Image (cartoon, rainbow, N blue to C red):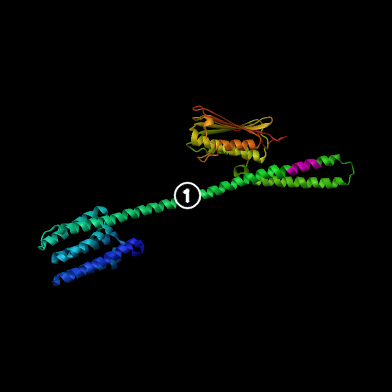
Amino acid sequence: MDPRSLTPALRALRLCVHLLMAGLLALAALRAHSVAGVVAAVACGGVYAAGSLLPSVRSSRRGAALWLGALCLSWLVLLWVTPEGLWIAFPLYFLQLHLLPVRWSLPAVALTAGAAILSYVGHGAALNPGVFIGPLLGAAVAVATVLGYQALYRESERRKLLIDELIATRAELAAAERHAGTLAERERLAREIHDTLAQGLSSIQLLLRAAERALPDGSPAAGHIEEARRAAQDNLAEARRFVRALTPPDLEHGSLAGALERLCGTAGPTGPRVRFSVSGTPVELPTPYEVALLRIAQSALANTVRHAGAERAEITLSFMGGSVTLDVVDDGKGFEPGAVRPSSAEGGFGLPAMRSRAESLGGSFTVESAPGQGAAVAVSLPLPTAPTPSPGAGGPGP
């Protein structure tokens, strides 16, 4: 394994194994009392040192396995020469658990412990519980340490992935909230400009027209009044351009009917089949009317998709003599309108908020539903005085 890829804990464990192996080999050489024992210990140390120097051992699993096999063979030779090599089994446990897959490392550890015990017995040492407990206890400690660390490392990596996903989700949520806040502020500004500045300029223009008609012919003030009326008219047109620029994106490139028709295609393949129709003669609506009707339709259709389990839904925009009406009807499972919570805790717009939006424009909002009988949401807004036909308006929509 490349040392640069090691975590601090693995790097410390690697250093401890090096020091332990060097100390135990030196102890075996000093206590061997024979040249063969010293040579075997030095040979084993040389094979071990080669593992840290050969690139193929660090970069290839196959190379590491071959090196580990050579190290185990040199250790068996040391065991055959002197029983002092028994203690080398402990660092070998860690190497086997670290370099081999679990299905091979556990049998290798068991064989190493058995070889250590047999070597001690084979050299004529007296049998006692320590002969068996020492190598087996060392193997158990090594297995618990390495496998425990590996489990903690995997859990740490899973937690890291979860944290990364959480951070990414939080960033997406923040971006969505900023976008929603921007749209809400655009709608608020459009409504405020329309209800205050544009209406005020329109009233000024009407008053100046009345004053102009009341002036006697040839009055020197007529020119000033005409100039003031044109200035008010120009500023009214500019205010209306501001209002149009601040409308929702769905209304920027088409009429309310077009935006509602496009909305029908957002239910998705698993949602209900949604149909849109227009009744009556369409007229041009003020921007706050269009925004309110579009938002209410979006919220009602979202509730249908999420909660109703409906197969069909219909959105109808009706232009009547003095009002415009929006109906959203579905054949879903229905509900008790009086049992609906007063807040939208599940992310929808919420019936109270839809009602508030309709009533803020002087309109009415009604909900009709019963369990098993679908639901119908109806919004009615009074038309402004003297509505003008919508450019290019036709008959009923598709």
Identify the residue at image location x=85%, y=47%: 223
Q: Is residue 241 magenta?
A: no
Residue 54 place in picture, x, y as percent: 28, 67
Q: Which quadrant of the view contains residue 192? A: top right
Indicate left or right for 104 with 361 as reference.
left
Q: Nearer the viewer, residue 272 or 239?
A: 239
Identify the residue at image location x=48%, y=50%: 170
On-image quarter of the N terminus: bottom left
Identify residue for label 1. Answer: 169
Q: Nearer the viewer, residue 102 or 338?
A: 338
Magenta-drawn segment: 200-208
Q: Amino acid at mark 1?
A: Thr
Identify the residue at image location x=19%, y=59%: 135
Could one spot residue 6 in this view of the protein?
Answer: no
Q: Residues within 10 Å of mark 1 (few under 14, many from 20)?
A: few
Residue 336 place in picture, x, y as percent: 52, 29
* Secondary structure under the numbered disc 1 in the rendered image: helix
Residue 358 place in picture, x, y as percent: 62, 36
On-image quarter of the C terminus: top right
Q: Nearer the viewer, residue 245 or 371?
A: 371
Q: In terms of secondary structure, what is the magenta stretch mainly?
A: helix
Could one spot residue 36 in this view of the protein?
Answer: yes
